[in-house]
Amino acid sequence: MLPIVAISMFLVDIGAAEAVPAFARKFQANCALCHTNVPRLAPFGQQFLANGYQFPGTMDGGDTAKIKLDGAQGPVTLDTLSNMMAVRLRGDIQKASFKEEPGNGVDDRWAIEMPKIVNFFFGGTVAENISYFIESEYNTMESNEPSVKFERVVMQFSNLGGAQGVANLKVGNFDPSSLFSFPTHRQQLNPILPIADTGTYPPAIQRIPMLPYAFSSKMFGLSNSSATAGSSIDGGFNEGFAMLPFAPTLYNAPVQNGISVHGRPGGDGSPLLYQVGLALNDKADGTRDQRTDVYAMLRFDFQAAGADAQISGFWYNAPDAARATLVNIMPLMNDPADNSIVYAADPTDITRVGIGARAQWETVDVYFAYTQDSIDTPVFMGGLATSQWEDTATGFSLEADWRFHANWMFGVRYDQMDAGGLKRLPTVATATGSANDAINATVQMISPILKYYPSPNIALYTRAHINMSSSSTLPDTNGRVVGFSGQEHPASNLENVLAFGVDMAF
């Protein structure tokens, strides 16, 4: 790996690199123009993003720093490769500890995940007010074999109708929350992914992820159904069938396929930013028909006493987005090896509302998000009707970062998830006299990070994730439900994660 990095640094001038350093090269700009603590965006950087990679207040995407080629049908302008391409490398050396061994080869030994993820970015403008962004990811951790795939591909048409900043259209695969005060991407603590099998039900969760729990789905007992209503089918589903309560989703998903419009009603000088959009996904009603999720966000920006601050609120509705799911208890009484499942009578809508805020004053950056999810109360028949469900859940994330030296940053994030969904199994499923039969569980995590920047585009860090959740055990089902046997709950089983790593972009 070191020779590759060295050659890459030799070939590409990284003196003014940033989170997407191609833009710094293109505009001959310092990182601090667009960033506070890389990768967090400063107010100017947020305006640059919203304006389709054109300087705020301008429509300069047609010719800035481009090569002009004359032709019979008129001139064509092109970006050089170094002005539209960047590479980001991330890697960890990490160690996790558990209350109980989670199984499936997951243990508390040191793990070297270097490189963990390599991202290739392409971004810029193709003409005035027409821009694009492409992210291709080489991921070594999500499957047995490394793979390359496109994560985000988006086109933006800015300043529609010639009105500066009033309306901008985005189409493609993108993060809906990119304009929110606490966006899913651009985190100081890169997400550490879960280790779980979502192709079985209930999902086998060896390790919960480390990411902002305000973004997570929060609901236990939901599935991405692949069968018709009320039917029972044997286990062995595609990956992603069981919906993890810890995974980012909906407005806070890493990527959604859809379309959105954002802008400032009074033009670029207005403190109010709006966003409305829709995302296209599959229904969880067994038909796999397409559903249309809709969302809206408002953000108010202001300055006071030398500080930049903003507050945001959003609403997101996903119709027929999931199915409440239970193991079919009656066959299991006679055949514990049978792990067929039963769906609730109808799929459920999921609605998420949330608020977020951010304040940046000199070298301190503080931001938070609070979200609440709600589902329809599931309806089951027979003995399964004795199951108990909570139809609301909340998540909260708060982070503060302090650049106490030109080369050093300290940050800490607190996350809490008060889960909903399946609360208790049907009465016939649990062992007689079981005192602890809770399925959902509150998660509380505190995550400090110390970063050293030898260069603006390179960060060396040490980080920890400390699980402060109270100990909780899954119900004892005497083998009637595969996956529940009275062991420590996955939400509280992880004690902590310690990691050392590097995050570089060039």
Image (tube, rainbow, N blue to C red):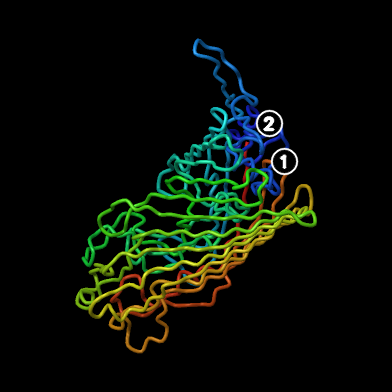
Residue under numbered circle 1: 33
Q: Name the side, left or right, on which 463 lies relative to 306.
A: left
- Where residue 353 appears, as percent x and y from the top left, is 50, 63
Badge 1 density bin: few <14, some 14–19, many ≥20, Cα 10 Å: some
Residue under numbered circle 2: 27
Seen in the picture, residue 436 relative to 359 is either above or below; the reply is: below
- Where residue 304 appears, as percent x and y from the top left, is 76, 56
- Where residue 420 appears, as percent x and y from the top left, is 44, 72
Q: Are marks 2 and 1 in contact (CB under 8 Å)?
A: yes
Q: Residue at x 31, y 83 (%)?
A: 427
Q: Residue at x 24, y 67 (%)?
A: 340
Secondary structure, mark 2, is helix
Q: Image quarter for residue 488?
A: bottom left
Choose the circle earlier in sequence order: 2 or 1: 2
Residue type of the residue flagged with mark 1: Leu
Secondary structure, mark 1, is helix
The one of 413 and 468 positioned closer to us in this rendering: 413
Q: Residue at x 26, y 58 (%)?
A: 286
The one of 268 and 318 positioned closer to us in this rendering: 268
- Where residue 214 appears, as percent x and y from the top left, is 54, 63
- Name the quarter where the N terminus is drawn: top right
Q: Name the side, left or right, on which 386 lies relative to 214.
A: left
Residue 41 is marked as none
Residue type of the residue flagged with mark 2: Phe
Q: Name the side, left or right, on which 124 lies relative to 439.
A: right
The one of 344 and 129 positioned closer to us in this rendering: 129
